[in-house]
Amino acid sequence: MGRVVGIDLGTTNSVVAVIEGGKPIVIANAEGFRTTPSVVGFNKEGELVVGQMARRQAVLHPKNTFYGVKRFIGRKYSELEPESKRVAYTVRRDRSDNIKIPCPQIEKTFAPEEISARILQKLAEDAEKYLGEAVTGAVITVPAYFNDAQRQATRDAGKIAGLDVKRIINEPTAAALAYGLEKRNYQTILVFDIGGGTFDVSILDIKDNLFEVRATCGDSQLGGDDFDKRIVDWLAEQFLQQEGVDLRKERQSLQRLMEAAEKAKIELSGVKVTEINLPFITATAEGPKHLETRLTRSQFEDLCGDLVGRLRKPIKRAMSDAGITPPEIDEVVLVGGSSRIPMVQQLVRSFIDIEPNKGVNPDEVVAVGAAIQAGMLGGEVKDILLLDVTPISIGLETIGGINKKLLPRNTTIPTRRSDVFSTGENNQTMVEIHVVQGEREMARDNKSLGRFKLTGIPPAPRGVPQVQVSFDIDANGILQVTARDRTTGREQGITIQGASNLSDGEIERMMREAAQYAREDREKRERVEKRNKARALVDKAQRTLKEVTLDFGSQFVSYHRRRIEALCNEITESLRENDERAIDRAESDLRDALYELNREVKWQYEEDDEIDLFGAIKRTFTGEREEDYWPSNSGYREREDYRYGGGYYDNEDRRDYETRDDRDYYGDRRNSRGDYSRSSRYDDYPPEQSSRRGRTSNRNNIPRQNNWDEDDDDEWY
Ligand code: ADP
Ligand code: MG
């Protein structure tokens, strides 16, 4: 059995965490970052890109880059506000009012669940790489204020990604778990979570090992993106007035506007005024046009005043539902990137006059909580009892279209409630159960979760038959409804499928496709890596030939040159023809040929050395065995540094030339001991250069041994 991870599947960013040695840790992705943009794209070659890479291509391929998809998951097209539909890619509805996202590059249409599945897949894969173990299960978080359809859809996304979704858990509850893990004294805390697309507020009691949610409320369509859009509109209106062009109508300009707006917004959390510059944003008959302006924090606050106003109601309602007043709250925990907006923080303070807790990382705390929940399910984390609630009331439609609530909001889950209903007409043999979720009195004003029929009721005067309807909510907050005719014992049940959810058949198909994509992707990546490796080897061989010729003359090399050049040509030719096996063969032969050449070079040095007994050349043996690096069957492929393309030459080269004074041969890259330690290597550089190198290597998260390979490729090969 594989590992179970905790995943915060955010609108903007996602994070994966796991329990290791009893403690939660956040896992960095393959690019070395602890958060992964929730962006999925297809590049010009039709290849899937996820995360940072996808985010980077958004401006270039706006139609094929999908972000913020969490706003669409589990929703109907007709439920979307016009605002949410304003994205740089296309959002469509199908015949059943479901949301579909076409990707022109690969001529395919996706359900939001599938896009989310790609993100989950990447996170799970990156976690596998880190753990060195298969990841088969996940606890996935959702906004507390997600309704049943949104929860189901998130669970489906996990399934499509090939994950066993062990639990769906509310984001603020997860945050509270992470916050409270270390402190188990009695506390009432308020978690305020505002990210890119959703807003939640939850009030919890933490008492010893009990985490009990008292109330939760929120807005699943309010987040940082809305703030960005206000800036986009402001910029676009200005530009429209000045230049007569609506930038929102062009996908690329819209995408650039959105990125600039987000950047400005983030800057305004730290400074009072920011510049916005977008050169060549569009072109008119007069020529290229540039956008250049500045935005002050107070202007921004004016633009977004009403959005901040919308945060008020859920806070108030959560407090009244929990039956507490602000002074009873001991701690405020701010979660989500948008909680850094000063105006948002002021609003929270205006309710609860205490300094928000600074001890949690607002970007990671949700994933950490999910990992803790995973640990609780797996038995690695003990002694915690978590009681969550259902965020929105659930009821059914009765005569006259009235919503009869069976499960009021903030009911502790898991739970089961039932009630007895009867027929409205004489001899009615069938009843239709229409399940709705929401607080409004009339059923039609709420979210319809689904309908089903109970048939075969024996004819009887109205009001006589007794139909017992039960609602079960499991620990995931997901609903199951059953109806039973008390006279006949006949039962009908459904797991509510919000109509935007996918059928089992569709999920199956999507699972297959996702798995196939992952496989194809891996193969593609391996192919590319192999080609790069072969090319690098050819370059290296040519350079080696040149250098050895310089040192020892063409006579010395001529035999090797013929062989090596022939093999290089063979590789180049095979690369052109995409003949994988020929590449492998020629590459292996070339390695052997280079090995022989290097050996001869080494002997030559040893001879020179003997002559020059008291000369300047010092030899240092590092104690490593030659077989560790050479030749092609030596197993270097398995080594970690293989991944960093070219990195493995580091060791090989070190061995090849270790017997000479490397300083001149390597262009001063090493000290006279042939030592690659960071300090000695960098000592040889002027200070500003060495610091640049230091930074670059950190950013790429490359093992120290390979530090200069990425940067120095061009110098070296
Ligand atoms: P989600 O949970 O929706 O994935 P995050 O918690 O990662 O979102 O928050 C992302 C949102 O936070 C984005 O809208 C981003 O612009 C915003 N954000 C991040 N940092 C800041 C900041 N310093 N000031 C204002 N907004 C920020
Ligand atoms: Mg979040």
Image: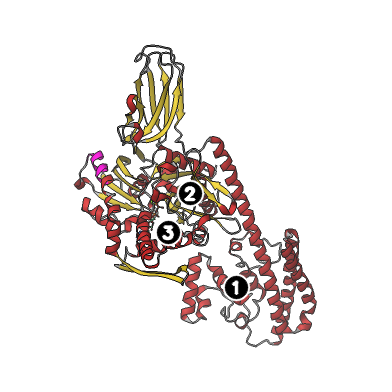
Name the main secondary structure of what is drawn in magenta: helix
Q: Which residue is mark 1?
A: 713
Q: Which dot, 3 or 1, sits closer to the camera?
A: 3
Badge 1 density bin: few <14, some 14–19, many ≥20, Cα 10 Å: few
Classify mark 1: helix, strand or loop: helix
Badge 2 density bin: few <14, some 14–19, many ≥20, Cα 10 Å: many
* Quarter of the N terminus within the rendering: top right
Three-letter residue code for mark 3: Arg
Three-letter residue code for mark 2: Val
Q: Nearer the viewer, residue 676 or 47?
A: 47
Q: Which mark is drawn over residue 361?
A: none
Contact (Cβ within 8 Å) of mark 3 with mark 2: no
Q: Which residue is mark 3?
A: 248
Q: Which dot, 1 or 2, sits closer to the camera?
A: 2
The alpha-carbon separation of the residues under discs 3 and 2 comes to 16 Å
Classify mark 3: helix, strand or loop: helix
Q: Is residue 125 left or right of residue 486?
A: right
Q: Nearer the viewer, residue 44 or 696?
A: 44
Q: Looking at the image, what colour scheme do you see?
A: secondary structure
Residue 322: say if magenta.
yes
Magenta highlight range: 315-323
Classify mark 2: helix, strand or loop: loop
N-terminal-most mark, 3 or 2 = 2
